[in-house]
Image (cartoon, helix red, strand yellow):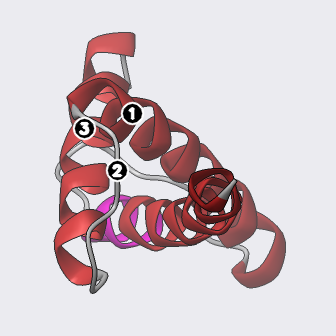
Amino acid sequence: MTIIGWIILGLLAGAIAKAILPGAQGGGWIITLILGVVGALLGGFLGGVLFNVDLGGFFDIRTWLLAIGGSIVVLLIYGLVTRGARRA
């Protein structure tokens, strides 16, 4: 997959992850893009290590499920980190 494909996949996976998780997460589209790309990479890595599943092409359902799952994990971690910063 090309870098443009990763950016589009990350942006969409991050947006879907934000829609799935309840509550208001901070950050605009740049934070969503960064979290989505990091989540896609994390999902692909964990899918390969834990389930022996590699990322497929852009239109492969495995790729989207791993990217969205990884984005949810990254978004949860981001929420925990920034929640403490808002209270201070």
Q: How many marks?
A: 3
Q: Which residue is mark 3?
A: 11
Q: Nearer the viewer, residue 56 or 3?
A: 3
Q: How far apart are the alpha carbons under marks 3 and 1?
A: 9 Å
Label 1 crowd (10 A; few <14 / some 14-19 / many >=20): some
Left or right of 77? Residue 50 is right
Q: Amino acid at mark 3?
A: Leu
Q: Residue 57, percent across and down? A: 31, 44
Which label belongs to residue 31? 1
Tag 3, which secondary structure?
A: helix
- Which sits earlier in the primary sequence, circle 3 or circle 1? 3
Indicate whether 56 appears above or below 50. Answer: above
Which label belongs to residue 58? none
Label 3 crowd (10 A; few <14 / some 14-19 / many >=20): many
CB under 8 Å between callouts 2 and 1? Answer: yes
Indicate whether 69 appears above or below 32. Answer: below
Tag 2, which secondary structure?
A: loop
Image: magenta residue range: 61-66
Which numbered mark, 3 or 1, is in the foreground of this view? Answer: 1
Which label belongs to residue 26? 2
Q: Amino acid at mark 2?
A: Gly
Residue at image point 59% right, 64% down: 83
Q: Quadrant of residue 74?
A: bottom right
Left or right of 47? Residue 75 is left
